Amino acid sequence: MTTEQQRTRPDKHHYASLTGDTWAVHGGNHADATTGAIRTPIIMANSYLLPQDPTTIDAPGFDGLVYTREHGANQRGLEEKLAALDHGEAAVLFGTGMAALHAAFFTVLNPGDHAIVSNVVYMRVAGLFDSLLPAKLGIDVDFVDITDLNAVRDLVRPNTRLIHTEVIANPDLRVADIATLAQIAHANGAVLTVDSTLTPPTLARPLEHGADLVVHSLTKYYNGHGDAMGGVVIGSSALVEQIRTGALHHVGGAISPFNAWLIMRGSTTLPLRLQRHCENAQAVAEFLLDDPRVAHVTYPGLPNHPQLAAAQLRGGYGGIVSFALNGRHEDRLRFVNDLRVITSAVSLGHDETLVAYEQYPQGPAAAFDPVFQQHGLIRLAIGLEATGDLIADLDAALTTAYGPLP
Ligand SMILES: Cc1ncc(COP(=O)(O)O)c(C=O)c1O
């Protein structure tokens, strides 16, 4: 077969029957028509050639590329992959996870609407609902323990338009019952938005349990290598189109083609990496649970976890382990600073394990288990290193800070 013939064959990567791990490898990648390169190249152009009749770009159904803030070749391929991995109809990319979350809320909410928000969510989302959305858009917000479904039901009002949660909450790792929250939202004509950053497919697919929109910070597990930022909103074609033509076109938090390409490359190994993240996290959580220097450990895969994580999680419980250490603040600082393999830095989902220690003196900590309020919370974003090396690093730093086990 000549190269010319190969180029004119239907693109195998269009076949919708490719799912799961295979789709993570092949989805959204298209051979380059100009060079024959088997990977979509990075298209660093702000504009695309207009059609012969440029006025057609505003016609309904026009799906050509025009301007990179609104769409580009790298964005399009990645959106195709991400929508299918979450079993959604469509996806729209943004420059960060926060831009994607903001776009979803900005689209769904109108002045005077009421939103019910989990009282443990990524802190910038908490800030958005705590001050910016009420002050700028006149949104009324109630924060609630999202695992207390009766409390959620009790908060619903006629003007409730949105319920927002994370599947596994950052940072205290409580697990939300997405299916029941979807029922509560839909019975009242509201929309359920779910931040699934800590649980990318294959760990969870919130749309299958009734969520209307799922959001990921692609900065985390999807990219996986700690070197690019991005965000995505996935859902029905109608809602995603509303987000694209409203928030993306007019507010403009677009992703760069280079970052979309990096995330596309990282995402090919997502299922494999998640498996390792989960295995390592489970082993680290079990190690910490048995250590008397540790005051409390939370990990959805531990038998002491208060929510039935297994209900909507499959294939693992994620890569984050949160724990509290006994002793004084100084002991905990000594522990964190003595770690040699594990790096003290924010973020999660990277190839390397990261640790973030926060004292949480007030604010969202009010919702945490009292042990975290008393001792602070140490979040381990477990990476892909050898399990034994991670446990040895933790053990050595605990010994430096607290002395050897009796
Ligand atoms: C659960 C969760 N959602 C959203 C975000 C925001 O993503 P980004 O940093 O890409 O804006 C983060 C960031 O840490 C996060 O942990």
Image (cartoon, rainbow, N blue to C red):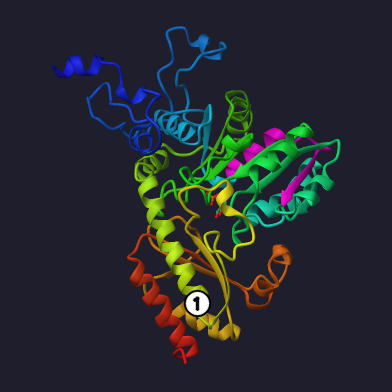
User: Compared to 62, does 177 lie above or below?
Assistant: below
The three-letter code of the residue at mark 1 reads Asp
103 within the magenta span: yes
Asked whether residue 344 is in view, the answer is no
Residue at 76% over, 54% down: 144
Q: Residues within 10 Å of mark 1 (few under 14, many from 20)?
A: few
Q: Which residues are magenta?
A: 99-118
User: Compared to 75, does 120 lie above or below?
Assistant: below
Q: In the image shown, does 77 or 162 lie closer to the viewer?
A: 162
Q: Horizontal and vertical percent for residue 260? A: 42, 39
Residue at 53% over, 13% down: 61
Outermost residue to the right? 158
Q: Which residue is mark 1?
A: 290
- How many labels sit on residues? 1
63 within the magenta span: no
Asked whether residue 315 is in view, the answer is yes
Q: Quadrant of the N terminus?
A: top left
